[in-house]
Image (spheres, grey):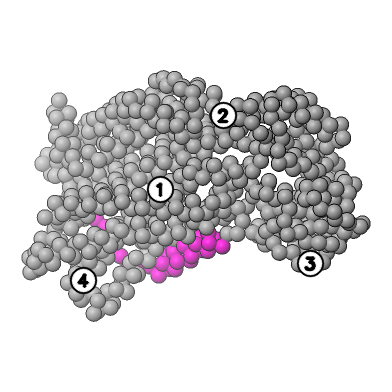
Amino acid sequence: MFYLKLACSNLKKNHKNYLPFFLTCMITVMLFYMMDAISRNSGLQQMPASENLQLILEYATWITGGFAAVFLFYTNSFLIKQRKKEFGLYQVLGMDKKNLTWMMAFESVLLAGGSIAGGLLGGIVFGKLLFLILLKMIHFEVVLSFAIEKMALLRTAGLFFFIFLVLFLWNLIQIQRTTPAELLHGQNQGEREPKTKLLLTLVGIATMGSGYFLALTTETPLSAIGKFFIAVALVIVGTYALFTAGSIAFLKILKKRKPYYYQTRHFITVSGMMYRMKQNAVGLANICIMSTIVIVLVSVTVSLYAGMENVIMTRFPSELYVEVSDSAQQQEEVLETILSEETKRGGVEREQILAYHNVNLPSILDGDKLILEQMELDDSYKDSGYRNVILLPLEDYNAMEQEKENLEDGQVLVYFPADTYRKETVTLQDHTYQVKKVLSTISIEERDAGYVVPNVYIVMPDLKELQMYSKKYAYENAGTVSYTEYFDLSGNSEQKESVILQIKQRAQKELEKTLVQSREEFRESGYSLYGGFLFLGVFVGALFLMATVLVIYYKQISEGYDDRERYQIMKKVGLDELEIRKAIQSQIRTVFFLPLVVAMLHMAAAFPALTKIMAALNLVNVRLEAVCTVGTVIVFAVFYGIVFVITSREYYKIVR
């Protein structure tokens, strides 16, 4: 019982350090269990697009597990550093390393047992609430049962028991391999003034500048997805390099400015920050990266969810979309029969009908030439060259636009919605056509606004030309021409839903290679998918916010103990209380808010690329995205300020 009493006494004595760690462990256990339990719920199979939602929840579970392992190791380093002197004193007073091992083992058991038990209990209690929140987000009205998942309980307990075991072994190795003298001075290690690292500073400027350049110069959704992750990697490297080396170089520059440096407040702030900047810089970079992750995740997922109706109308400007890949005359007649019979039976009518034959061909635009065979894109084409060519027969164009255009052999009409085309000819692979007219608008563009790759519309004299290109260059359904029809339905929502269901069932049964999509069907699957994204974004954002708060807290506590002796020295050399307080406040504010300012800069640079990525997901309302982003930044800054007030009070208590 001696070791148990000693472990309890130690944890109680160090409650300022261990209580936040214990609460974080418990919350992490609770969140992991809830994610795992929800992902295993059999009722998810009833939901539309359930596969996507289950995949999102599985990702959230693994992210939580990986986050827990990495973050608990990170915060554990703060705890061990603060207690090295204590462990050294125990050995000086007569404890051997075997006694320390038993004491540390009981502490680990108390922490692990309490946090795992408390986390699992909290997960069971609040799991149903989280489950109901998820159902609300995805607009799923059926109440699903929420059960205690035994497999999730075992998996959670096993994972966190393993994490605590590894933490204990790691702490034990650190204590066993050091002498009492080293432990007594462990808190003061690594405080030498670092040297200026010019090369690392230049690397930081180059990598961050390159990341910003990639994010700001992205032109299309196609290139944004690939470039964004490269930009993120470059910015992370640049952030660490500039915080660890660039900040020191900047402080050295301030130190050389004698009129600025030799002022009481500036002298103490600059020299104090530089004295332990190497340790501070890594923590500040971590806070900056985690803050950026929180802002990006939450702002993007909130934008997608808030703009769901905008996404739906962009993707489906018409209520129903029907496409027959092989548009033989017989197939079209069968489709027309199905549409006529089912709309009549359902008591509704088709409105705003837009019907046409077409062939879609991926291509690369090079001057006035559309290359149809070169499908591998090199860097010169990724932003501006990729186009989707849509070939249309003249008869269908005239019917859609109520025009009376005529075309001779070798003549075409063209429409480039993303470009201003001024050339007299256009070349499709090896065939050059005379451009009779460059169209200013075309009805199809309004009904197909949800594309990722820019479209090029070319109106050709007849169907034979379309069949020739389909046979030579189409990757799917070669030699055939597709028939597409967009239309709205009159009537109430129940009538529409019934008619759409019947059309889809009959089309799939009576026709081959037929695609039927409706706005309402997409709304159900869209809310399931984007609601899942929002759930994941807020969930992971909360995890990283919790990590940010804890890192800031431990950083303030650690600095408070480091500054306590320097505070006494400043008093002894003659500085009054007010001067010392002003100097310390200046240093704390500078160090504390620097990561937030840099995170905001990162978000501002990433915003153009993020809007392109969201455009690939059919959200094209940039104003809504900007409002959601600014709102997320403001809310995060408020939380950040609250943490500053709380942690700075603890800092001043320790220092004084």
Give the secondary structure at mark 2: loop
Q: Is residue 68 left or right of residue 76?
A: right
> Which residue position is annotated with label 3?
423
Disc 3 marks which amino acid? Lys
Q: Position of residue 573 (x, y in %)?
A: 9, 68
Neighbourhood count class around disc 1 (C-alpha, 10 Å): few under 14, some 14–19, many 20 upward: many
Q: Looking at the figure, which quarter contains the N terminus?
A: top left
Where does label 1 land, which residue? 294
Pick whichever of labels 3 and 2 is earlier in the sequence. Answer: 2
- Residue 96, position as x, y percentages in the image: 17, 38
Task: Work out how far the residue at label 3 is from the one at label 4, CA to CA, in angstroms.
Answer: 67 Å
Magenta stretch: dominant SS?
helix
The residue under the point 49% across, 62% down is 212
- Callout 1: helix, strand or loop? helix
Residue 534 appears in the rendering: yes
Select label 1 or label 2 by which is in front. Answer: 2
Label 3 to label 1: alpha-carbon separation: 48 Å
For marks 1 and 2, give the CA distance. Answer: 28 Å
Which of labels 3 and 4 is toward the front?
A: 3
Q: Label 3's element?
A: loop
Question: Which amino acid, mark 4?
Answer: Phe
Q: Which residue position holds label 4? A: 267
Q: Check whether the beta carbons of the residues at disc 3 and disc 1 lie within 8 A of each other.
A: no
Instruction: Pick the residue in front: 371 or 547.
Output: 371
Amino acid type shown at disc 2: Pro
Image quadrant containing the C terminus: bottom left
- Which residue is under mark 2? 48
Q: Which span is picked out in magenta?
A: 189-217
